[in-house]
Image (cartoon, helix red, strand yellow):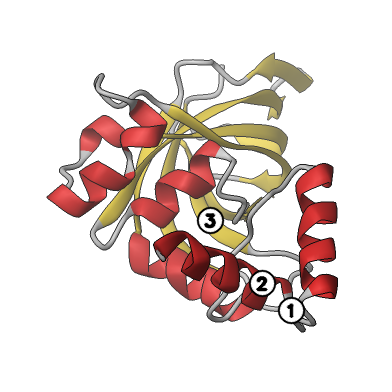
């Protein structure tokens, strides 16, 4: 039976992807000495908000996400990859897309942080194809296998700023989009951003 462990050794922005994507580098180690023919790996990544402290501004920004109760884990991503054959250890890259939609819990959480780290838990499953004395052997990756990662908030901001410099995403109902378009047309306003600023200014009066 394969004796596997996983460690996250690096997280960096993935450059020139179609959408904001983080590049996780995992080190997979097999401790029994058995030759790994291949590994079909699945990784669930979960944010663990309770594993860090928050300043007053962050806590206030997160009220809409967690309410008055304790922070609960947030699903971030589920990704899969194939690990080629190896003996001993191998490094493998995981490409993890990042949503900047503030209506998505993970995007809301990331945007609310001013600094520090984002505590992540990586949980693994999948299929191991090993090579033993009797040929190819197939077994499942145990569900108990997991590791942690502390993603710097600065790394996430660097990623988002590379794709959306100085801007953000806000999801609106179709009727709201249509009403905003009418307001722009009626008031000869060039952009949706300028129209929202105009409306906000009117609320302040």
Looking at the image, is 166 positioned above or below residue 49?
A: below
Label 3: which residue? Answer: 24
- Which label number is shown at residue 87? none
Residue 127 versus residue 155: which sits nearer the camera?
155
CB within 8 Å, label 1 to label 3: no
Label 2: which residue? Answer: 195
Left or right: residue 8 compared with residue 87? left
Looking at the image, is 77 positioned above or below residue 202?
A: above
| SS type, badge 3 | strand
CB within 8 Å, label 2 to label 1: yes
Residue 65 versus residue 16: which sits nearer the camera?
65
Mark 2 or 1: the one toward you: 2
| SS type, badge 1 | loop
Looking at the image, is 142 positioned above or below residue 199?
A: above
| SS type, badge 2 | helix
Left or right: residue 126 compared with residue 103? right
Label 1: which residue? Answer: 191
Mark 2 or 3: the one toward you: 2
């Amino acid at each position: 039976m394969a004796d596997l462990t996983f460690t996250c050794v690096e997280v960096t922005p993935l450059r020139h992807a179609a959408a904001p994507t983080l590049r996780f580098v995992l080190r997979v180690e097999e401790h029994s000495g058995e030759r790994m023919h291949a590994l079909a790996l699945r990784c669930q990544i979960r944010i663990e908000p309770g594993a860090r402290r928050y300043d007053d501004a962050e806590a206030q920004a997160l009220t809409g996400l967690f309410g008055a109760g304790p922070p609960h884990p947030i699903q971030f991503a589920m990704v899969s990859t194939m690990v080629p054959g190896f003996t001993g250890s191998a490094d493998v890259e995981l490409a993890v897309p990042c949503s900047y939609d503030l209506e998505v819990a993970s995007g809301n959480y990331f945007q609310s942080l001013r600094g520090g780290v984002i505590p992540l838990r990586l949980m693994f499953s999948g299929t191991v194809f090993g090579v033993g004395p009797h040929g190819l052997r197939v077994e499942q990756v145990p569900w108990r296998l997991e590791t942690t990662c502390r993603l710097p908030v600065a790394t996430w901001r660097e990623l988002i700023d590379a794709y959306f410099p100085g801007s953000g995403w806000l999801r609106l109902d179709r009727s709201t989009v249509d009403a905003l378009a009418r307001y722009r047309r009626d008031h000869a306003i060039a952009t949706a951003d300028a129209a929202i600023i105009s409306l906000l200014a009117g609320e302040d009066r």
